[in-house]
Image (cartoon, coloured by chain):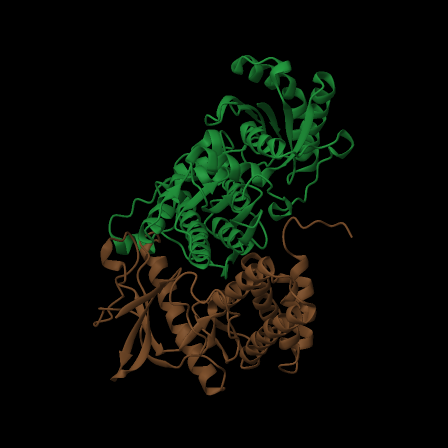
Amino acid sequence: MISIGLESSANKLGVGIMVHPDDGKPPQVLANVRHTYVTPPGEGFLPKDTARHHRAWVVKLVKKALREAQVSPKDVDCICFTKGPGMGAPLQSAAIAARMLSLLWGKELVGVNHCVGHIEMGRLITGAQNPVVLYVSGGNTQVIAYSSQRYRIFGETLDIAVGNCLDRFARTLRISNDPAPGYNIEQLAKKGRKLVDLPYTVKGMDISMSGILAAIDGLAVQYGLDGDWNDDEDVANNASTSDDLENAKPTRADLCFSLQETVYSMLVEITERAMAHVGSKDVLIVGGVGCNERLQEMMGIMARDRGGTIHATDERFCIDNGIMIAQAGLLAYKSGSTTALKDSTCTQRFRTDDVFVKWRD
Amino acid sequence: MQLITQGAEAHLYKTTYLSPSTPAALKIRPTKPYRHPILDRRLTRARVLQEARCLVRLVREGVNVPAVLAVDWDINNTNNNHSGAGGDVGEGVRGNGAWILMEWIEGCVVRVVIQRWERYIKSRSAAVKLQDNEIEEEEKKVKGLLRRVGAAVGALHKAGVVHGDLTTSNLILRGAEEPAAEGDGEGVSPDMQGEVVLIDFGLASQSIQDEDRAVDLYVLERAFGSTHPRTEPLFGEVLEGYRASYRGSGSVLKRLEDVRMRGRKRSMIG
């Protein structure tokens, strides 16, 4: 069976095509194309502009995906789209495209929960059977484990998502949004040496990040690092001894480094707490922030100390994409779930644990 | 020494204190290699001291928690010379962790008791059609346990401490028998008598704010729902037990309603 998936919950528009061979062989990715709406440094993406970008690109991407996969519309069994959660206007643009394709090709629609899409794609790529899942992206931060037909949320952020925290700090420092603000923070953090004191807010298996963002934004202002870059500015700290470094003024690299070290420690800690609580040894990281190598490294050390393993993927599967929607949608379709045209709406609020997972036992 | 469990932050060992016949719980917080050394030392030190302070206070107030016997917040650092810490750090700054020695509580964690009960009900109802009065009897037992859980949390809050990580893994039912092996004692409904003892104060803090208390209850409610989905409908009993446990519980439960609304991506319909 072949499914096509359309993803558009944030600034990425993705189209993917998956096949589940009828002879029981493992599922395969036939096409995975994506186009990202990139804004200038210091600016975020607004829903209406993002939706305009998606509307302009969706037909091109669908054609490109079909061409890459060497599949014609009559081979497709179902059309999957992101029902939510995400930004309203961008979600609608792909939902409309999916409805159009459904009517045009006469194929069934399947609405997919974005978070479940990430989890199913991560499980497929890494082969992790029943891991604790850390789902970290620009709009979501959740620690999830599967139990009795649902992906249950054990811990989550109480305010903003970790990716949102990083993106907004990138805006404060006027770091480029190309290819992604989080990626550029990661590169800058590699040059950081000085750890500044930031709040550390873990509440059981939940975390809070808005206070950390306010604190580090305040430090950036205090040291004159908000706004445009000076040509003579040192990116990395050049203090030579540890005493010098302690007294040195932090640089942009130091702030990125401190922010990453603090929030990733919190994420690893709540993931470990959930693993201890449910008695699982394996961890799977999904979502856009999941391709950060420092986070993967920290999580790997933690998992190793518990005698477990970490499963992570690269940007093709971590960052929002169409194949994860195609994969989760096809699993639902095979277990008999479809979405009628009149129900093919989308919603900004759609919790991971709202989905009845019929395809697992 | 026998390793009992590896929690998120600490390893728990069973050992003895003063005499070989007095069991004690040794909780070692090893250094976390994934964390930056400065951050690691700061957190380890703050948490172990906070844990000890809270426990001492709670024992004095007569709350059911293990007593503290000894504590060391910085293993192997006898000269305590930390003035050079900071800056570009090597392994020298990384601490060696910390430990706390506590009274041993004999019993079984509430999570296991409830899970055993859930399995018992499932296998029993598969074997025979359960009579209404039997279901009622069984539920009454669990409800009684949940009320005592609520009362224990209430006593904690009354003493001016919030736990910070309330889950059914952090509650011990004193005297309950640990199943010796997987599947042991499956055929009988588990015993639910005994006191509820609160453990693991690694994230505890001293507070009498309604907000902190309500978040404490919210954390428990969420952990309960995700760990025991089948027993979740009975969670209200915990809150009833809490309500009856001290004056001032009413305003905390009111605040809990606000805290619940704050969760992300909740459906706003209805």
As drawn, is B220 to the left or to the right of A231? Answer: right
Count of marks overlaid on the render:
0
Whether residue B115 is situated above or below residue B209 in the rendered picture: above
As drawn, which residue projects farthest toward the front?
A: B128
Whether residue B188 is situated above or below residue B67 in the rendered picture: above
Colour chain A is painted in: green
Residue A11 location, quadrant? top right
Colour chain B is painted in: brown
Whether residue B25 is situated above or below residue A75 in the rendered picture: below
The answer to whether residue A322 shows anywhere in this view is: yes
Residue pictured at 48% horizontal, 46% vertical: A133
Please provide percent x and percent y for residue B46: 39, 68
A150 and A225: which is toward the camera: A150
Residue pictured at 64% horizontal, 39% vertical: A86
Residue pictured at 49% horizontal, 86% vertical: B62
The quadrant the N terminus of chain A occupies is: top right
As drawn, is A27 to the left or to the right of B89? Answer: right
Please provide percent x and percent y for residue A335: 61, 35
The answer to whether residue B165 shows anywhere in this view is: no
Please provide percent x and percent y for residue B201: 44, 71
A13 and A286: which is toward the camera: A286
Please provide percent x and percent y for residue A283: 42, 46
The quadrant the C terminus of chain A occupies is: top right
A269 and A197: which is toward the camera: A269
Residue pictured at 43% horizontal, 75% vertical: B107
Residue B29 location, quadrant? bottom left
